[in-house]
Every structure is written in C-alpha cells, then in structure tokens.
C-alpha cells in the first residue's frame, strides 16, 4: 500500500470505507506523552468516526473509535500491518514537505 496524502476528512473517510475488513496498526497519541499502539481490523465507518476492533491480551478483542480529523492532524496514525508503512500523511507533514 502506498501512503496517501490527504487534506480533507472526506478523503480519509473514503479510503477507510474501502479498507473495511483489513488489518492495520493504530498509533494513538493520548496526550501527556502517552502513546498507545495496537493492531486491529477496521470494522465500520460512520460519518465522523471509524471503528477498529483491536487485539487485546489473552485473545480478547475490544472496539475503539477514532475520528477522521485525528488522522488528518496526525493524532491518530494508521500503518499497513505487514509493511509498516504509514497509510496517511498528516496535514502538518504535508505543509513541511511542500
């Protein structure tokens, strides 16, 4: 998968709609230097959030919801689980590259 430059929430929503059922790695910045990394499967997409079913300890699963705007700003990062490549370029990084 190649990294997708996005500059609008609708672009992220559209791409994730196509990826329902695929496994991804999620890195979420929870504030105060707390970063959570989990592997999971994109379950559903809604108008303003998407749901990832993440793998927990001892075979348990939980569902986490994330906002598209957090992907846009880089607060939540999504990676291809096999290659480790970032799926979306956060908006701030695009400005630095141009």
Image: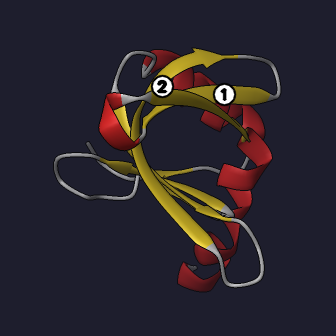
Asked which colour scheme the image uses, the reply is secondary structure
Label annotation for residue 50: 1
Helix, strand or loop status at disc 2: strand
Residue 18 left/right relative to 7: left
Question: Which of the 4 quarters of the picture holds residue 36?
Answer: bottom right
The front one of 40 and 67 is: 40
Query: Which residue is found at the position 81% from the left and 19% from the top?
Result: 47
Residue linked to disc 2:
42
Query: Which residue is found at the position 42% from the left and 22% from the top?
Result: 19
For marks 1 and 2 on the same chain, the one whose residue lies earlier in the sequence: 2
- Quarter placement of the N terminus: top left
Residue 88 lies, in percent from the top left, at 50, 52
Residue 79 left/right relative to 15: left
Query: Which residue is found at the position 29% from the left and 58% from the top?
Result: 85
Question: Which of the 4 quarters of the picture holds residue 58?
Answer: top left
Whether the residues at callouts 1 and 2 have beta carbons within 8 Å, the answer is yes
Question: Which of the 4 quarters of the picture holds residue 17?
Answer: top right
Q: Quick check: 11 above or below 6?
A: above
């Amino acid at each position: 998968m190649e990294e997708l430059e996005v500059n609008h929430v609708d672009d992220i929503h559209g791409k994730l709609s196509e990826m329902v059922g695929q496994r991804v790695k999620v890195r979420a910045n929870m504030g105060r230097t707390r970063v959570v990394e989990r592997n999971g499967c994109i379950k559903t997409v809604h108008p303003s959030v998407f749901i990832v079913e993440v793998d927990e300890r001892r075979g348990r699963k939980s569902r986490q919801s994330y906002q598209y705007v957090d992907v846009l700003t880089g607060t939540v990062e999504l990676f291809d689980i096999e290659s480790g490549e970032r799926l979306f370029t956060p908006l701030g990084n695009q400005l630095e590259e141009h």
